[in-house]
Amino acid sequence: MTKLSKKEFYNRKTGIYVEEFWRAVTLLESKDEVRAFFRDILTHTERGMLARRLQIAKLLYLGKEYEEIKKELGVSDGTIGTVSRWLHEAGDGYRIAIERLSSSIKKKKLPKLWERDPAARLLVGSTIYGALQAHKKYKKYRKRKSVSK
């Protein structure tokens, strides 16, 4: 885990530095700027740790069990427990981020055209139906090939 320097760090200054850090983050205007900033300010390991914590929080928020999370993310019970405590004791930041991520993913699944244009629905629907039919035929073909050997 990342540690602060053992040298004395004055509380008054710490608050000023942390506030300036948050101000810098909020002034970034695009995903690319945010990515570049965090790539510069965090090590590869720190970025991975933060990303995993968010995934742990998301899985806990979705009701997943510790064992599932350990298996999927390769993290310890201690790490899951720490994130779980943060999520339950304060957790507003996690909840906001997780809910906004979920809504942004849902929005990207079906474009606006899908909602407005019945022809688009028909085209996509028929494409999916055709793909499913082709997949069924392929499975039958593979089954016959394996039986005949």
Image (cartoon, rainbow, N blue to C red):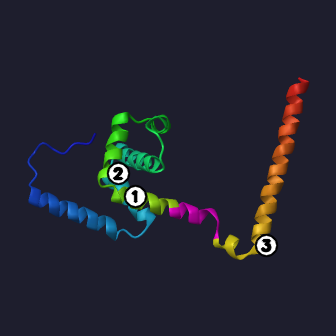
Give the mark nearest the N terminus, 3 or 2.
2
**Badge 1 vs badge 3, beta-carbon distance below 8 Å:** no
Residue at (88%, 26%) from the top-left corner?
147
In the depicted view, which residue is nearer to us: 66 or 133? 66
Gap in angstroms between the C-alphas marked 2 and 1: 8 Å
Q: Position of residue 25 (x, y in %)?
A: 32, 64
| Residue 60 location (% of width, % of height) | 43, 46
Q: Secondary structure at mark 3?
A: helix
* Label number found at residue 87: 2
The residue that disc 3 covers is: 119
Task: Kindly identify the amino acid type of the residue bearing the numbered disc 3.
Answer: Ala
Q: Is residue 1 above or below residue 18?
A: above
Residue 26 x/y as whole percent: 33, 68
User: Quick one: SS at disc 1?
Assistant: helix
Q: Amino acid at mark 2?
A: Leu
What is the magenta range? Answer: 103-111
Residue 110 lies within the magenta run: yes
Can residue 35 be seen? Answer: no
Q: Quadrant of the N terminus?
A: top left
Residue holding disc 1? 95
